[in-house]
Image (cartoon, rainbow, N blue to C red):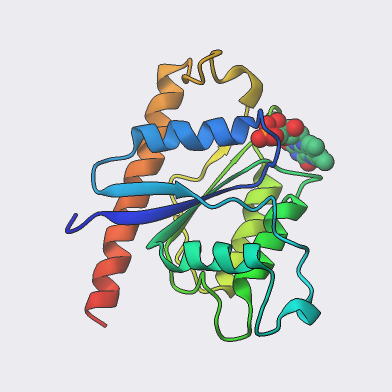
Amino acid sequence: MSSTKKVAVITGSLRAESKTRTMAKAIIAEAPEGLSFEFADIGDLALYNEDLETDTPPAPWTAFRDRIKGADAVLFVTPEYNRSVPGALKNAIDVGSRPYGKAVFSGKPAAIVTASPGGIGGFGANHHLRQSLVFLDMPVLQQPEAYIGGLWEMFDDEGNVKSEDTRKFLRAIADAFAALIERSTKALENA
Ligand code: FNR
């Protein structure tokens, strides 16, 4: 990879002991050289309201937008809430999508990893999020698809992945995402 690419990491759970945040860290640990990661926090974003879209929008909105603007790519790691995207994450998508014509997500390659204690692995959230990212014109990693079940048994007390197979799968996701970022960057340079 030519130069280090910055990846903003957005997790859909706000709780301190979030397992999907642990999952995000595990993916980062498996990522190849050439990528750097920074979490973009979404917990302090006011609910999106067009009335607040003035010359001085809420400071957390501006900080979030600047963080995404400064990134080359976005990694989403999220649980599923009621078979869909957690409200806090959908709000972050909405905040980043406006003002009209200035969506900070546009064109940035993305990967979506959903995880759940159950067997379905957040499939509903994964594809609802995918739907929004299509509208935002983000090239989204297609394969490997990442609907990860068994979330509550996945890590030891230090946050290490217990299963070697799972670790390999997380590495495969990170490698495929790095390749997508590389391809997308080249395509932009040649455009
Ligand atoms: C859930 N959970 C859940 N799980 C799932 O697989 N499908 C679902 O539709 C839901 N719905 C849901 C709604 C709400 C409001 C909560 C709080 C939870 C369970 C969820 O996957 C579990 O709590 C995860 O551990 C949440 O991820 P974090 O917080 O550990 O990152």
> x and y percent of residue 164 in the render?
40, 18
Q: Name the one closer to the observer, 138 or 157.
A: 157
Asked if one can make out residue 107 in the rendered structure from this viewpoint, the answer is yes
Q: Quadrant of the C terminus?
A: bottom left
Quarter holding ligand 1? top right
- The N terminus: image quadrant: bottom left
In depth, the one of 159 and 189 nearer the eye is 159
Q: Residue 165 in the image: state x and y as whole percent.
A: 42, 22
39 sits left or right of 83 in the view = left
Image x and y of residue 71, in percent: 41, 62
Quadrant for residue 59, please give it. Answer: bottom right
- Which residue is rendered at x = 47% and y = 60% of the image? 140
Q: Residue at x 30, y 48 (%)?
A: 35
Which residue is situated farthest in the left direction here?
A: 2
Asked if residue 150 shows in the view, the reply is no
Residue 13 x, y percent position in the rendering: 68, 41
What is the quadrant of residue 14 in the picture? top right
Does residue 172 sit above or below 187 in this rendering?
Answer: above
